[in-house]
């Protein structure tokens, strides 16, 4: 059994060389050498397809619940949740899709390789550090002191545009993604989504503008983390292996990202300028504290002292500095929960449910992604520089972009220009789907309630297409 454990998943270097043959021949040879590859990828593709039809499950759940309520009301019975509706609603939650499809994957491993191999892969091979980090940093970034501080800082910028909805919209979509290079992309996504909900989505814009904003947010956050070498997951995967530092990132990626973010935001602002004018007349922009945050359990929250905010920032800094050491940042989070309890007079309830759902989503994604290297690595290595860029961009839509860049580190003797191309492509495509970039599920979880049901993958793809192309132009033409 020991030999079986060490062979699963099979090392990429152990596959037989297929010299002089095309990509399809190489992939076919790898399936012949390891038939489980086809099973694992088939289950993964079913999970991806599930994300595109999740909205139908939710819609069906609503119809079934409404029919059940009508029958119970007609019979004079108290209303209760329908089991069928709840099951369908569960299938319609995008955050649980990959974890759900992890069950047949684990079952397939058990049937083909045995229980010990399955537990070895799930417990010892798959690395869950990134999902755990996202859970902690999301919970910290969504606390009242951090959000209030971020809003106060961004308000100074928004005042340049008189704090209109358009001014807030531009400020959040330009400044917050760039902050992701320093406070990490998950934290930037959390803060940006929370502020967009308060300063923009609460004004009830059109559904077209809602999707345009979400697509732009996802793309901007994906490319906005490239000013440094320590904040964006796809950069973290390669920075140490390829010896990239912050100076390298700014010179090759950062200034292009900042330009693309600004241009994309301005383009969408011009396109929707008439609607922004209408939004400005609907209601005044709320102040830093909203009524919902001022009161909790029948009490009014006190103004936040500076030292409380400073301690929160200290916990965030501890988490970022120890991002690769889950024992340290999880321990720090447990200490934070105690601090939040002690300072409850200044705190709103710490949101744990949303970060946990996002973490579960990412954990399921890395569970499946660890078995996709057999086809991703040869696809990347078979492409030229420009096709590699576009190939990484497209593949990112169906895999977390950190997985794409990690697999690129497994390709031997990769030229420097090819390394840059694959990272550029990975971050460029990070806004095309919810699964393309680790922070995207956080944005979806925080803003999903504004979309009248699950976010439509096709509409998100179309909304992100223009900023994606503008980012591609910035990386490839400048």
Image (tube, rainbow, N blue to C red):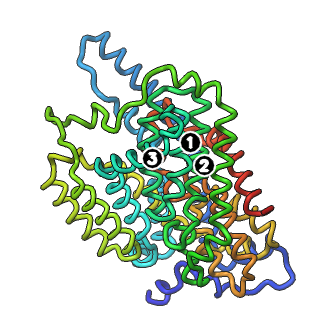
Q: Earlier in the sequence, mark 3 or mark 1?
A: 3
Kindly identify which numbered label has been placed on residue 466. none
Q: Which residue is mark 1?
A: 170
Nearer-the-camera pick, 312 or 171:
171
Q: Where is residue 217 drawn, in percent x and y?
A: 56, 47
Q: Which residue is mark 2?
A: 49
Q: Where is residue 122 drawn, in percent x and y?
A: 42, 71
Nearest-to-viewer mark from 2 and 1: 1
Kindly identify which numbered label has been placed on residue 154. 3
Q: Earlier in the sequence, mark 3 or mark 2?
A: 2
Residue 90 appears in the rendering: yes
| Residue located at (40% from left, 21% from top) | 66
Nearer-the-camera pick, 447 or 79:
447
Q: CA–CA distance between discs 2 and 1? A: 33 Å
Element on which disc 1 rests: helix
| Picture quarter with the N terminus | bottom left
Q: Where is residue 213 drawn, in percent x and y?
A: 58, 39
Asked if labels 2 and 3 touch by Cβ distance under 8 angstroms, the answer is no
Element on which disc 3 rests: helix
Nearest-to-viewer mark from 3 and 2: 3
| Residue located at (50% from left, 34% from top) | 162
Q: CA–CA distance between discs 3 and 1? A: 10 Å
Residue neighbourhood size for the residue with mark 1, other residues' Cα within 10 Å, grouped as few (<14), some (14–19), many (≥20): many
Label count reads: 3
Residue 104 appears in the rendering: no
Residue neighbourhood size for the residue with mark 2, other residues' Cα within 10 Å, grouped as few (<14), some (14–19), many (≥20): few
Nearer-the-camera pick, 97 or 211:
211
The image quadrant of residue 151 is: top left
Element on which disc 2 rests: helix
Judge from the rendering whether residue 473 lies leftward or rightward of residue 277; answer left or right.
right
Q: Earlier in the sequence, mark 2 or mark 1?
A: 2
Note whether 61 is above or below 337 in the view shown: above
């Amino acid at each position: 059994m020991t030999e079986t454990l060490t062979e699963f998943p099979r090392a990429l270097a152990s596959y037989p060389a297929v010299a002089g043959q095309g990509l399809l021949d190489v992939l076919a040879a790898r399936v012949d050498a390891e038939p489980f590859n086809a099973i694992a990828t088939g289950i993964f593709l079913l999970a991806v397809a599930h994300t595109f039809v999740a909205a139908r499950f939710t819609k069906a759940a609503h119809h079934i619940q409404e029919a059940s309520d009508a029958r119970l009301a007609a019979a004079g019975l108290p209303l209760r949740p329908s089991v069928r509706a709840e099951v369908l609603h569960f299938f319609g939650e995008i955050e649980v899709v990959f974890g759900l499809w992890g069950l047949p994957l684990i079952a397939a491993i058990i049937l083909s390789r045995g229980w010990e191999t399955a537990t070895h892969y799930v417990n010892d091979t798959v690395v869950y550090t990134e999902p755990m980090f996202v859970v902690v940093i999301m919970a910290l970034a969504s606390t009242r002191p951090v959000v209030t501080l971020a809003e106060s800082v961004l308000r100074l910028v928004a005042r340049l545009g008189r704090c209109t909805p358009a001014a807030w919209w531009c400020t959040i979509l330009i400044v917050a993604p760039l902050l992701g290079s320093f406070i990490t992309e998950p934290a930037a996504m959390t803060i940006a989504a929370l502020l967009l909900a308060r300063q923009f989505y609460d004004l009830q814009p059109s559904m077209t503008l809602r999707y345009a904003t979400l697509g732009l947010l996802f793309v901007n956050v994906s490319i906005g983390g490239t000013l440094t070498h320590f904040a964006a997951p796809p950069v973290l995967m390669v920075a140490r292996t390829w010896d990239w530092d912050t100076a390298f990132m700014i010179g090759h990626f950062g200034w292009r990202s900042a330009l693309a973010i600004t241009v994309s935001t301005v383009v969408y602002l011009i396109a929707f300028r008439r609607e922004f004018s209408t939004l400005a007349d609907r209601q005044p922009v709320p102040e830093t504290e909203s009524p919902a945050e001022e009161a909790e359990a029948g009490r009014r929250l006190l103004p936040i002292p500076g030292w409380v905010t400073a301690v929160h920032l200290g916990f965030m800094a501890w988490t970022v500095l120890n991002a690769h050491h889950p024992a340290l940042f999880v321990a720090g989070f447990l200490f934070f929960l105690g601090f939040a309890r002690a300072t409850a007079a200044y705190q709103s309830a710490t949101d744990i449910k949303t970060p946990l759902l996002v973490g579960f989503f990412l954990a399921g994604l890395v569970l499946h992604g660890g078995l996709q290297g057999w086809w991703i690595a040869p696809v990347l290595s078979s492409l030229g520089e420009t096709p590699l860029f576009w190939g990484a961009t497209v593949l990112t839509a169906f895999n977390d972009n950190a997985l794409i860049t990690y697999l690129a580190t497994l390709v031997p003797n990769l030229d420097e220009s090819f390394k840059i191309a694959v990272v550029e492509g990975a971050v460029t495509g990070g806004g095309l789907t919810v699964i393309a970039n680790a922070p995207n599920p956080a944005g979806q979880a925080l803003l999903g309630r504004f979309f009248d049901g699950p976010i439509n993958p096709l509409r998100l793809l179309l909304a992100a297409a223009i900023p994606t192309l503008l980012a591609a132009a910035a990386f490839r033409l400048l």
